[in-house]
Image (cartoon, rainbow, N blue to C red):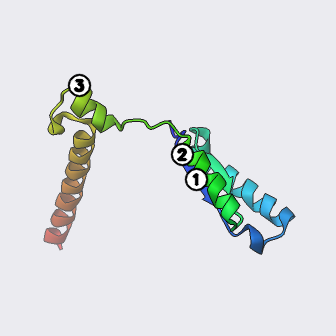
């Protein structure tokens, strides 16, 4: 699902190897766990040109995937308003309208 996502960690030259490994494990297990579980990858950048080139080589090898909205518009011939993206926007707008209505009633009651 997120196989083309690359999380790049930098500042390796500013910490020792042991502390860096500990911090990397913390990032993997806490902050980026859900993304990594979905196929994202974590790479190190050690502030060298070679390291940057290695990261770019890795990214270039990714296989391009169309976005869901692209498939819906092109392959499924849906109109924009029929896409999942449009439905999500509509849901969020309706949610905001409801919140504002509740807030208006509260303010009117005061």
x, y percent for residue 30:
65, 53
Disc marking residue 2: none
At 23% from the left and 25% from the top, the residue drawn is: 76
Examine the rendered structure and indicate whether residue 35 appears above or below residue 73: below
The answer to whether the residues at label 1 and label 2 have Cβ atoms under 8 Å apart is yes
Extreme residue toward the right, this view: 18
Q: Mark 1 points at which residue?
A: 56
List x then y, in percent, for residue 68. Answer: 33, 35
Q: Distance between the residues labelled 1 and 2?
A: 6 Å
Camera-near label (3 vs 1) is 1
Q: Name the residue under label 2.
A: 60
For mark 1, give the secondary structure. Answer: helix
- Judging from the image, what secondary structure is the residue with disc 2 in? helix
Is 5 displayed left or right of 108 in the figure? right
What's the CA distance linking mark 2 and mark 3?
A: 29 Å
Q: In this view, does 54 lie to the left or right of 78?
A: right
- Neighbours of disc 3 within 10 Å: few (<14), some (14-19), many (20+): few
Give the quarter of the figure containing the C terminus: bottom left
Q: Mark 3 points at which residue?
A: 76
2 vs 3, front mark: 2
Q: Label 2: how many residues lie within 10 Å, few (<14), some (14-19) or many (20+)?
A: few
Write the residue at 24% across / 45% down.
91
Asked whether the viewer can see residue 31, the reply is: no
Name the side, left or right, on which 16 lies relative to 87: right
Q: How far apart are marks 3 and 1 (CA)?
A: 33 Å
Q: Is residue 33 above or below residue 10?
A: above
Front position in the image: 77 or 47: 47
Whole-percent x and y of residue 66?
Answer: 37, 36
Sequence-first tag of 2 and 3: 2
């Amino acid at each position: 699902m997120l196989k083309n996502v690359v999380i790049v960690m930098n500042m390796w030259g500013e910490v020792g190897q042991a502390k860096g490994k500990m911090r990397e494990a913390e990032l993997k297990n806490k902050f980026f766990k859900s993304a990594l579980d979905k196929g994202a990858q974590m790479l190190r950048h050690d502030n060298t040109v070679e390291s940057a080139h290695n990261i770019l080589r890795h990214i270039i090898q990714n296989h391009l995937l169309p976005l869901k909205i692209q498939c819906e518009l092109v392959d499924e011939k849906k109109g924009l308003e029929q896409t999942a993206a449009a439905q999500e926007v509509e849901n969020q707008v309706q949610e905001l309208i409801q919140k504002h209505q509740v807030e208006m009633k509260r303010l009117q009651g005061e």
